[in-house]
Image: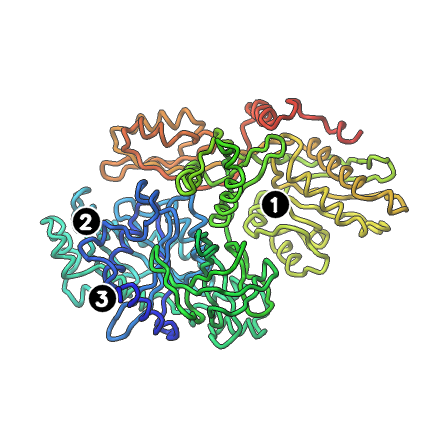
């Protein structure tokens, strides 16, 4: 029996002992050392040689990850470790640090109960560090802290032992400030990371050593000793005396919750059903004897096994061969296999109980976010993220015969990566893929061409815009094509603060008059009681509100009115881009008494065209997506970076010095970042490290509106002139 099979046997024995299970994620900014640190945990479990820990990067097993030196996919591994005579099962998810793959982090947070936040001791808390801490806390996932690359503070920045400790104090304070600002009320104090309690470790993942308050007492190695070991370049000796895995494992076991503790407070965040129901109680108690409930957090497609759905089991026992319901797809399926993950390998097991992370095969067309259960239940809450695809490329096969295969592959990719959105351009027949940025689309292109061996033609990246309005429109009257139905409507923009709350709520679709939860959420956002009750639909963060009174037969065409509104917000009048933050008020309607004269062919165009007229009368503008850039470069290249940023409509918000490095923080339009990777590399001879963070949509400068609208219309095959409001009313 190989070591992996042996590890799985041990894991199976421990899956039932939920007090000794820890489901954890490793999160950080890009290049701060997550995968390097995970190597030490894998080596300590006997699954790789200790000599290779820190350099082998076991969890980056995808070929492109090795080529680029970054994590792209979240990877799972189940490890058994012994501590103080007791065995613990630690299910680890190593997550990506690049903003383009932030969706992987959000999905991983649903499966875990605790995270180790890795922070580079030299760079400190970076934008993506803040983002991952917020993502974890939004899901009620408890953080602990590992300050990495401590050796660089001594050997590269030449800090004294005192300066090094000052740097640590500053980093810990920044992390705690973020925890306090984003934690649930009941945990604001309790979840603060504290050196004297052991919820902070310091070390070097690359050289595989670490210390904490507990290890200092056991080994008598303190900050002064670390400083000496690093200065004398005796880090191998240090790793033998104070190994990284010992400090990190103790921190995991003592400070991160087991599933029984965690589900008591996490269940209400991830599931809005009745806590008193049978399944509600089973989830709160992490009860393996209750009905099965599992949330799919990741999907991979295997050419032999088909769809493999990975997820967290919140209650019940998953067993191979049993029938199960896929709540979202509304169908019953049989589980063919239950598997646990050992990095890139998956090992079959007969069953996995509540409180664990596992994979299942046998579900066709499954998606990340699906709810798997043995009984009918309300689905789990969708993943909480406000970031959205901002860049699009068109893709077509070089050879027509590959088209059916390409369609299948795109379907598979969107299943594996829900942050890639695929649409078909009806006019040109091109497949459009939208992603979080240039790197995200590069990786997707690689997957199609290299992994699936389909040669493709790729168009230049296109930026996704939004259409918004600046002021309230007058009340306008639109007519149906047969002139028998009239609708009075107006448009206004949703206030910025309320709009932010709406975006975060992720509410979308029809709102039923009796949907008390949705109405209460609208009131909470600040829409007011009367208005909240009159909201009919939300689409693309735009709203349809019924302000009419006593109109006979309006309820009969309610669905059509909502569809007409949805069509208008999906493709706006400026350039067929999605609407954003627009509130459409239906103020009055005159309907033909005969239902045959108010069917879809009459109502749909009347509503859509009147929405367009209202938008065009409200000072409409295009919004462009922005990203916050974080660029680190040697001082000698400051001028080159400033010049490059100056040419790209970039607003530099902060510049600071860290040792011999200069750090720029700037806000840039996504459009200006196309090709930025290559130019910044050549301008700094590859010395600049940069990352970006999604920063929402902002109005395109006035002087560029006309030119960009025309360019987008031309690309979409529309005539170049935007129609007038009157055109849509005639």
Q: Nearer the viewer, mark 3 or mark 1?
A: 1
- Residue for badge 3: 214
Q: Earlier in the sequence, mark 3 or mark 1?
A: 3
**Mark 3 → mark 2, Cα distance in angstroms:** 20 Å
Coordinates of residue 627 in the picture (x, y in percent): 45, 37
Q: Is residue 666 above or below residue 265?
A: above
Q: Residues within 10 Å of mark 3 (few under 14, many from 20)?
A: some
Question: Colour mode?
Answer: rainbow
- Residue for badge 2: 151
Coordinates of residue 672 in the picture (x, y in percent): 45, 29
Q: Is residue 376 above or below residue 297?
A: below
Of helix, strand and loop, which one carries label 2?
helix
Q: Earlier in the sequence, mark 2 or mark 1?
A: 2
Left or right side of 726 for 632: left
- Of 524 and 591, nearer the camera is 591
The residue that appears at 58% across and 36% down in the rendered structure is 466
Q: Is residue 73 above or below residue 25?
A: above
């Amino acid at each position: 029996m190989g070591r992996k099979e042996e590890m799985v046997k041990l894991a199976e024995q421990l899956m039932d002992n939920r007090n000794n299970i820890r489901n954890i994620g490793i999160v950080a900014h890009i290049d701060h050392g997550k995968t390097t640190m995970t190597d030490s945990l894998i080596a300590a479990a006997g699954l790789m040689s200790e000599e290779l820990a820190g350099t082998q990067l076991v969890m980056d097993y995808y070929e492109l990850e090795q080529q680029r030196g970054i994590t792209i996919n979240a990877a799972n591994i189940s490890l058994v470790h012994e501590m103080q005579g007791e065995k613990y099962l630690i299910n680890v998810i190593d997550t990506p640090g690049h903003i383009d793959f932030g969706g992987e982090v959000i999905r991983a947070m649903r499966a875990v109960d605790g995270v180790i936040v890795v922070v580079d001791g030299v760079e400190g808390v970076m934008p993506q560090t803040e983002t991952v801490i917020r993502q974890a806390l939004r899901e009620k996932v408890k953080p602990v802290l590992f300050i990495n690359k401590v050796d660089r503070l001594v050997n590269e920045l030449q800090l004294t032992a005192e300066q090094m400790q000052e740097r640590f104090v500053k980093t810990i304070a920044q992390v705690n400030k973020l925890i306090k600002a984003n934690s649930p009320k009941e945990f604001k104090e309790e979840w603060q990371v504290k050196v004297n309690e052991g919820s902070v470790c310091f070390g070097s993942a690359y050289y595989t050593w670490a210390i904490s308050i507990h290890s200092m007492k056991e080994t008598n190695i303190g900050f002064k000793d670390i400083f000496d070991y690093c200065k004398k370049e005796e880090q191998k000796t240090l790793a033998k005396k104070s190994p990284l895995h010992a400090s990190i494992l103790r921190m995991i076991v003592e400070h991160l919750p087991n599933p029984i503790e965690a589900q008591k407070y996490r269940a209400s965040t991830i599931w809005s059903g009745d806590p008193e129901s049978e399944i509600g109680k089973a989830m709160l108690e992490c009860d393996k004897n209750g009905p099965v409930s599992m949330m799919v957090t990741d999907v991979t497609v295997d050419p032999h096994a088909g769809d493999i759905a990975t997820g967290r089991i919140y209650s019940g026992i998953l067993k191979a061969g049993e029938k199960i319901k896929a709540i979202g797809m509304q169908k019953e399926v049989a589980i063919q296999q239950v598997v646990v993950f050992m990095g890139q390998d998956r090992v079959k097991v007969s069953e996995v109980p509540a409180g664990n992370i596992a994979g299942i095969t046998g579900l066709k067309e499954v998606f990340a976010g699906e709810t798997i259960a043995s009984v009918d239940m309300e689905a789990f809450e969708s993943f909480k993220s406000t970031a959205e695809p901002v860049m699009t490329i068109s893709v077509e096969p070089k050879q027509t015969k590959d088209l059916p295969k390409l369609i299948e592959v795109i379907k598979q990719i969107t299943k594996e990566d829900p942050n890639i959105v695929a649409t078909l351009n009806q006019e040109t027949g091109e497949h459009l893929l939208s992603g979080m940025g240039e790197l995200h689309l590069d990786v997707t292109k690689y997957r199609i061409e290299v992994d699936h061996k389909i040669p493709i033609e790729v168009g230049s990246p296109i930026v996704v815009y939004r259409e918004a309005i600046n002021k309230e429109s007058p009340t306008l009257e639109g007519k149906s094509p047969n002139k028998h139905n009239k609708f009075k409507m107006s448009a206004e923009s949703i206030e910025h603060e309320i709009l932010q709350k709406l975006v975060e709520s992720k509410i979308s679709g029809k709102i039923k008059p009796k949907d008390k939860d949705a109405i209460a959420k609208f009131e909470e956002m600040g829409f007011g009681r009367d208005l909240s009750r009159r909201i009919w639909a939300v689409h693309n963060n735009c709203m349809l509100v019924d302000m009419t009174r006593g109109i006979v037969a309006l309820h009969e065409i309610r669905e059509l009115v909502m569809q007409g509104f949805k069509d208008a917000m999906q493709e706006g009048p400026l350039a067929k881009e999605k609407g954003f933050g627009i509130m459409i008020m239906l103020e009055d309607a005159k309907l033909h008494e005969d239902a045959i004269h108010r069917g879809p062919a009459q109502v749909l165009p009347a509503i859509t065209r009147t929405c367009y007229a209202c938008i065009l009368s409200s000072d409409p503008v295009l919004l462009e997506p922005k990203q916050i850039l974080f660029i680190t470069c040697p001082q000698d290249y400051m001028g080159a970076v400033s010049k490059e940023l100056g040419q790209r409509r970039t607003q530099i918000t902060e510049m600071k010095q860290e040792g011999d490095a200069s750090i720029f923080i700037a806000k840039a339009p996504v459009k200006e970042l196309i090709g930025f990777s290559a130019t910044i590399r050549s301008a700094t001879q590859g010395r600049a490290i940069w990352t970006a963070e999604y920063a929402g949509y902002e109005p395109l400068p006035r002087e560029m509106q006309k030119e960009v609208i025309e360019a987008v219309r031309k690309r979409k095959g529309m005539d170049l002139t935007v129609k007038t409001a009157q055109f849509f009313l005639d």
